[in-house]
Image: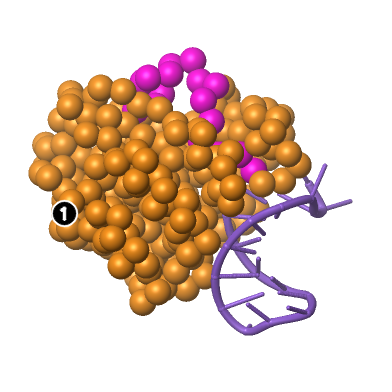
Amino acid sequence: MKIVSYNVNGIKARLPRLVEYLTEQQPDIVCLQELKSSDETFPEADIRAAGYGAVWHGQKAFNGVAILAKGSDPIERQRGLAGEDEDEHSRYIEAEVDGLVVASIYLPNGNPQPGPKFDYKLRWMERLRTRAGELLAEERPVALAGDYNVITNDDDTFSVRAMQDDALMQPQSREAYRRLLAQGWTDSLRTRFPGGGVWTFWDYQAGAWQRDAGFRIDHLLLSPEAADRFVDAGVDKEYRGREKASDHAPTWVRLS
DNA sequence: ATGGCTTAGTTCCTAAGA
């Protein structure tokens, strides 16, 4: 079973690319981020026509997450994270598909740092860790898939120097990610490529794609029960080079 | 990057992204 995390950067602008991806790759589960679409304008009919059921948590213009399942309707379990009532960003949705618990995560970017956006990022990571702990306690297969906006190691970026002041690479961001992993999660892509050097994002600017100047920020975390079923992980990098591509590439893990 | 693209919306400029 192939589980994908894909930050589409606008589902309306990316719909032909997304449908093409679903048709060509036939993934079983797809977690989308950055829909930039309200709940009402989510293109449910087009996705259903491609053979996928969906649940989504939209927001006008920014954020927005969804979970797609091939040939079935995901059963929604939760939208949003507890712990901050005034938070209206649509960044978390969780559902059950085929006995597997799946979350689609769009973690705050946090730039510029320091500042209120960075503080929000760190608070959100703590709220995520609280939910992740609850999920681990269920002792069942769980995948936390999404755009974490954290470059977790120095070998996860084309240039440490270019990114050193960025919120994605601050020690506080990395420590929060490590605290999450330390609960017992497995970073799929890191397991498959322990030496790093694998990117999931390439900026639209400054010829980043042409220079292969990317970094790894889209992660699929597995509970021990899911990690037992790990087969392979990778990035469908080719889709970043296509016409009207997102700045992220689909990132995936395969489970038995 | 003091922002060189791209997207969406109060659309012909501004905000946000990473």
x then y, percent, for residue A177: 42, 37
| Residue occupying image coordinates x 57% and y 42% | A242
x then y, percent, for residue A72: 16, 54
Tell which subunit mark 1 falls on: A
In which quadrant of the rendered image does the C terminus of chain A lie? top left
| Residue occupying image coordinates x 41% and y 36% | A251
Residue A184 appears in the picture as rendered: no
A152 sits to left or right of A233: right
Give the residue furthest to the top: A195
| Residue occupying image coordinates x 39% and y 53% | A19
Q: How many numbered tags mark residues here?
A: 1
Judge by depth and name the residue closer to the eye, A93 or A185: A93
Number of residues whose C-alpha sits closer than 10 Å to that of mark 1, classed few (under 14), some (14–19) or many (20 or more): some
Magenta span of residues: A188-203
A136 sits to left or right of A32: left
Judge by depth and name the residue closer to the eye, A91 or A55: A55
In which quadrant of the rendered image does the N terminus of chain A lie? top left
* Quarter holding residue A39: bottom left
A178 shown above or below A95: above
x then y, percent, for residue A57: 33, 65
Q: What hue represents chain B? A: purple
Tell which chain the image draws in orange.
Answer: A
| Residue occupying image coordinates x 70% and y 30% | A211
